[in-house]
Amino acid sequence: MKKPKRSSAPSEKPRNRALRLVFEYDRTDIKLISQQRLAMLAPPPHPLVSRENERGFWVLLSDAEGRPLYRRVMDNPIRQDIEVVADDPDHPLTRVRVAQPRGQFFVVVPDIPANRSIALFGEAAGVDVKPAPSRELCRFKLAPSKK
């Protein structure tokens, strides 16, 4: 029995590196406040290109030329309403609109050497806003990855 041939090229280890990106929001103003490198796998990606007129929330990593590298669809972390206990026994929980949404959230994405920016996509916020396809809410440059 023959032994399998070994490649002379060095084997490349899988990259188990990710970035935790922490964002802060105050109404429609979103800021990237920290970037932390982690030794872990990021959640699996979704298709890089969104469907026409797609609604929802997602993050998109892009390279220096703006080409998409990673896209992750997720629940909208920017809370426009909250669940509260109501006095109605038939409907003990109800949702109430937050007048001035503010808070923090984080996302974990792969730490790919070509990463240059992250964009957040979502629906416009507001009481009188009609449902519409998601749009780019903000974009931030990322610190260079260590190779």
Image (tube, helix red, strand yellow):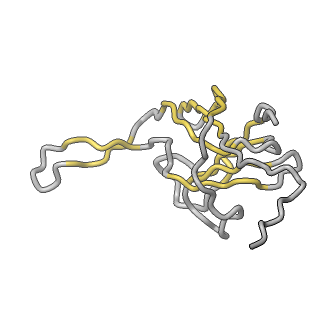
Which quadrant, please, contains the N terminus? bottom right
Horizontally, residue 10 falls left or right of residue 105, namely right
Residue 130: image location, x then y, percent: 52, 59
Q: Nearer the viewer, residue 39 or 51?
A: 39
**Residue located farthest toward the bottom when viewing the structure as drawn:** 1
Quarter of the view holding residue 48: bottom right
**Residue located farthest toward the front when viewing the structure as drawn:** 1
Count of all numbered marks drawn on residues in the image: 0
Horizontally, residue 28 falls left or right of residue 145, namely left
The residue under the point 53% across, 35% down is 27
Residue 65: image location, x then y, percent: 89, 50
Q: Nearer the viewer, residue 113 or 23?
A: 113
Q: In the picture shown, does residue 15 fall above or below 104?
A: below
Q: In the picture shown, does residue 132 fall above or below 52?
A: above
Horizontally, residue 77 falls left or right of residue 116, namely left
Q: In the picture shown, does residue 33 fall above or below 98?
A: above
Which quadrant, please, contains the C terminus? top right
Q: In the picture shown, does residue 136 fall above or below 138?
A: below
Q: Nearer the viewer, residue 127 or 30?
A: 30
The residue under the point 65% across, 37% down is 19
Residue 69: image location, x then y, percent: 76, 54
**Residue located farthest toward the top when viewing the structure as drawn:** 33
Q: Nearer the viewer, residue 86 or 105?
A: 105
The residue under the point 22% across, 48% down is 93
The residue under the point 55% across, 36% down is 106
Residue 101: image location, x then y, percent: 46, 35
Quarter of the view holding residue 143: top right
Horizontally, residue 91 falls left or right of residue 53, namely left
